[in-house]
Image (spheres, rainbow, N blue to C red):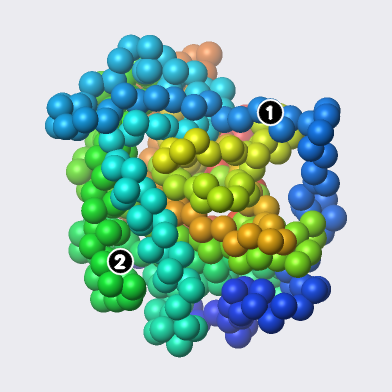
Amino acid sequence: MINYPSDWPEPVVRVQSLSETGDTVIPDRYIKPPLERPSPSFNSTGSSDNLNIPLIDLHLSGPVNRDHPTIQKTTMDEISLACREWGFFQVVNHGIRPELVDGVREIWREFFHQPMEMKQDYANAPTTYEGYGSRLGMQKGAILDWSDYFFLHYLPSNLKDHNKWPSQPPFLRDMVEEYSKEIVRLGNILLKVFSINLGLEEDYLQKAFGDGDIGACLRVNFYPKCPQPDLTLGLSSHSDPGGMTFLLPDENVTGLQVRKGGEWITVKPARHAIVVNIGDQIQILTNAIYKSVEHRVIVNPDKERVSLAYFFNPKCDVRIAPASELVTLTTPALYQSMTYDEYRHFIRTKGLQGKSQVESLKISK
Ligand code: OGA
Ligand code: NI
């Protein structure tokens, strides 16, 4: 295990508190360099506003399909294309009850709207990141993102600790339990689909992730209203370091943008959809047949935004390397192997920095 400092390099400021002061200017430490700021939005013509990430119907609603999920061939093909071309897609009829999808998002919204003292009980530290937080990375003087978050572990079960989950509002823990179970069910289905689509044994990725010992952790993002949304970001550009991510977006307000070519595409979520994206570990395992794509979050002057990012990760101490079945003379291994624990160290010390980390693992020619 890698050890982290026990406290942040600077006093923690809650972005929600800043937002609630009603100031019309944001502090300098949230102002991004000009090239990183959101591009001015031009809505009427000439923009890629109509473009969206692929929408895939999994046809997994109903009890029969839940216990014996079968994914149709055409759906498998749609997923394959989305993984290769986008690294991002949204799924509907994923089998998670619509009431649970809305309920878990709204109970977290309530959590963030409780008095600050209640949230401060869960204030996090860089040692594990668990709890209520307002920054990623340990660099003193870093430019920060316009968001607060709550981070918790679900798997492996020895890391799960209900005492570190909010005790209020009532039923939050129960609802997070139920939602987590559903996300893990969906994650296991998709690992199998990806393995088959890649021509690997159907349990290949599952085994590569640590065979039943995967990690699953939840980061609930809270993006308060921002008086100067053109100068900052809710979350800086990054690719997710883990295996894959299941994002439950806020349906009241857009914010997530995905890089496609040179452009930023704003994700328009379908009702009750879950956004799935490939993380760096699957990019490494597939030798870049599937890519983890850069994304970021923009903020809004009139609306707050709540999202739940569920990270589905390899066991922290198994070595992740390109699958030998996908390494050929013409497609040699692109990456050195590393454990997820080692990999995550980068993001936990330096914060979000585009795709620089997975690039740094590239084997030089
Ligand atoms: C993340 C993330 C996007 C969002 O938490 O890694 O990319 O829409 N979140 O909140
Ligand atoms: Ni992300």
Residue 332 picture location, percent across and down: 50, 22
- Residue type marked 2: Leu
Q: Which mark is residue 89?
A: none
Q: Which residue is mark 2?
A: 172
- From the viewer's perspective, is residue 306 above or below residue 269? below
Q: What's the residue at 66%, 74% (across, down)?
A: 19
Pick whichever, 329 or 20, lies toward us. 20
Q: Is residue 214 left or right of residue 271?
A: left
Q: Which residue is mark 1?
A: 50
Q: What's the residue at 72%, 61% (across, down)?
A: 301
How far separated are the C-alphas under marks 2 and 1? 36 Å
Q: Is residue 282 left or right of residue 352?
A: left
Please, what secondary structure does the residue beneath circle 1 have?
loop
Quadrant holding the N terminus: bottom left
Q: What's the residue at 45%, 52% (across, down)?
A: 309
Pick whichever, 272 or 215, lies toward us. 272
Quadrant holding the C terminus: top right
Residue 102 picture location, percent across and down: 39, 51
Please, what secondary structure does the residue beneath circle 2 have?
helix
Pick whichever, 159 or 170, lies toward us. 170
Q: Quadrant of residue 119?
A: bottom left
Residue 37 picture location, percent across and down: 78, 53
- Residue type marked 1: Asn
Q: Quadrant of residue 360?
A: top right
- Is ligand 1 within 8 Å of the beta carbon of the residue shown at mark 1? no
- Residue 334 appears anywhere in the view: no
